[in-house]
Image: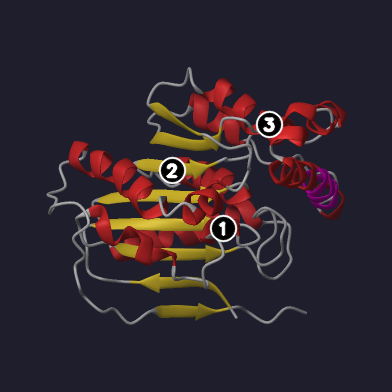
Amino acid sequence: SEYFRIYDNGADVTIFFFFFMDVLFAGEPRFEFRKQLDGIGHNANFVFIRELRRSAYHNSPSGAPDGLEYYTHKVTELKDQLGARVNIGMGASGGGSAAFYFGTRCGFDHVIGFSPAFPETVWTGWGPQLRALADFGLLFTRPLDYIEVVLVALAANVIKHTIVRANQNTPMWDVYPRYRDANPRPSGTIIYGARCRPDAAQAELCKSIPGVKLVPLRTGRHNGPGYLKERGELATTLSNEIRPVLRRLGVPLTPANTATGRTVEPRSEPVPAIE
């Protein structure tokens, strides 16, 4: 078991993947998501960050309630060690919140979030839960999407209450105001299901932040990567969003959908023993 896996290609671009409960990987084997990025047109380093405690990064792997500081230190350390000129964060759901949070604290250049659930109040509390349950239009037109949204809403409340209790009522991370008020601030892309009420509300909240691009998907699902993977559009969507960012940051690109063809051995750090 591992909490970080690093693919050091000696590149001047590093992409950090934050995931929470495996949502980002769209059903693919862990750490194989990087194959979806063969078409970005530039060699890159990859860092995959697993959240073992299912506490939305609020606890470190040892279980201590210092997770936000721990991961900020580790991500900054890895960023400096890899030494890339351009750093991009990516994640989905709680992993998307992590990408925006740590991307802001660690000085990333760009962040891509699939339905990044921040502030968490778009999903937690009685109001969002009741609105999710009462979305009968989604229930009758896309019942599987409806079930997914209801389950995510229920899980979000359980996770939040568990984190707050476990960390002696310490408030949840301040992703939204931290990102909104940061200067400098990484530019951001939010990819979300336009028919998913909580995710659409989150996108509406963030659309006025300078440098944020919204990419609505024609689905009611929260799991955007899964939706795109099923349609065979995940790699193309990622390429279409990352290539303009790299071009804007002065990174030379080869034609789209051209892989580097370079095989890289992963370097991993083991999980410390948990008492």
User: How many badges with numbers are in the image?
Assistant: 3
Q: Is residue 244 left or right of residue 60?
A: left
Residue 200 falls within the magenta-colored stretch: no
Residue density around tag 2, few if under 14, some if 14–19, many if 20 or more, within 10 Å: many
Residue drawn 25% across the image and 79% down it: 263
Q: Where are the magenta residues, as a range?
A: 154-163
Query: Where does the image place residue 118, in percent across and percent down from the top left?
Result: 63, 35
Residue drawn 72% across the image and 46% down it: 144
Question: Can you identify the residue that label 1 sits on?
Answer: 19
Give the quarter of the image for residue 249: top left
* Above or below, 192 relative to 94: above
Question: Can you identify the residue that label 2 sits on?
Answer: 112
Q: Nearer the viewer, mark 1 or mark 3?
A: 3
Query: Where does the image place residue 31, in percent across and percent down from the top left?
Result: 47, 70
Residue density around tag 3, few if under 14, some if 14–19, many if 20 or more, within 10 Å: many
First reached walking from the N terminus: tag 2 or tag 1 = 1
Image quadrant occupied by the C terminus: bottom right
Residue kind at label 2, given as amino acid type:
Ile
Give the quarter of the image for residue 38: bottom left
